[in-house]
Image (spheres, rainbow, N blue to C red):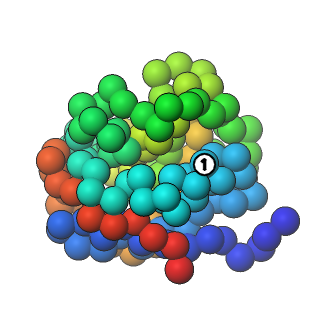
Amino acid sequence: MSTTPTKGLIQTNKGILHFELYDNDAPETVANFKKLLTAGFYNGLKFHRVIPNFMVQTGCPEGTGAGGPGWSIKCETNGTKQIHDRGVMSMAHRGLDTGGSQFFICHNRGGTAHLDRVHTCFGKLTDGFEILDAIRAGDIMEKVELF
């Protein structure tokens, strides 16, 4: 198992969010995210749902919150890093094992603690928290890449 986390960035129209992935804690979810990212799936998508003091959500190709990649992945909620906190990236879903491409980034622990072990945490921001706070519905992920 890898000890160095995969790192990347989300370039938004407001600035850059740097992240690292939970390669060992949520390996299937991370592999799915990397597959979509490598294919350019996320480039140009909107943050379609923003709830202040809770989270920003993106990853819907339709920009409505109803779309996905055409497949579903299993939830991975038993790892040690499955704690929703400020900057954590977590897979959105409409029920157990129905995630695909949509994900959210948490604003704080207080607003998201109830999601622990319900949604799969697959990464966290390492920089750009002021950008996270500035994102509004309709803002764009211009480019998502690994480095």
**Residue pictured at 23% horizontal, 73% vertical:** 15
User: Residue lying furthest top in this view?
Assistant: 95
Give left or right: position of 103 versus 14.
Answer: right
What amino acid is found at the position of numbered circle 1 in the picture?
Answer: Asn
Residue 51 image offset from top left, x and y in percent: 23, 39
What quarter of the picture does the N terminus occupy? bottom right
Residue 108 appears anywhere in the view? no
28 shown above or below 132 = above
Give left or right: position of 47 versus 95.
Answer: left
**Residue pictured at 43% horizontal, 34% vertical:** 68
- Please tell me how crowded label 1 is: few (under 14), some (14-19), or many (20+) other residues with Cα within 10 Å: some
Report the front residue among 75 and 64: 64
Give left or right: position of 125 versus 43.
Answer: right
Residue 31 image offset from top left, x and y in percent: 65, 53
Indicate the quadrant where residue 55 lies.
top left
User: Residue lying furthest bottom in this view?
Assistant: 147
Indicate the quadrant where residue 62 lies.
top left
Give left or right: position of 25 versus 19.
Answer: right
Residue 121 image offset from top left, x and y in percent: 57, 47
**Residue pictured at 53% horizontal, 19% vertical:** 95
Residue 145 appears anywhere in the view? yes
Query: What count of labels does the image hold?
Result: 1
Query: What residue is pinned by disc 1?
Result: 32
75 shown above or below 131 = above
96 shown above or below 75 = above
**Residue pictured at 58% horizontal, 55% vertical:** 35
Residue 49 image offset from top left, x and y in percent: 24, 38
Secondary element at tag 1:
helix
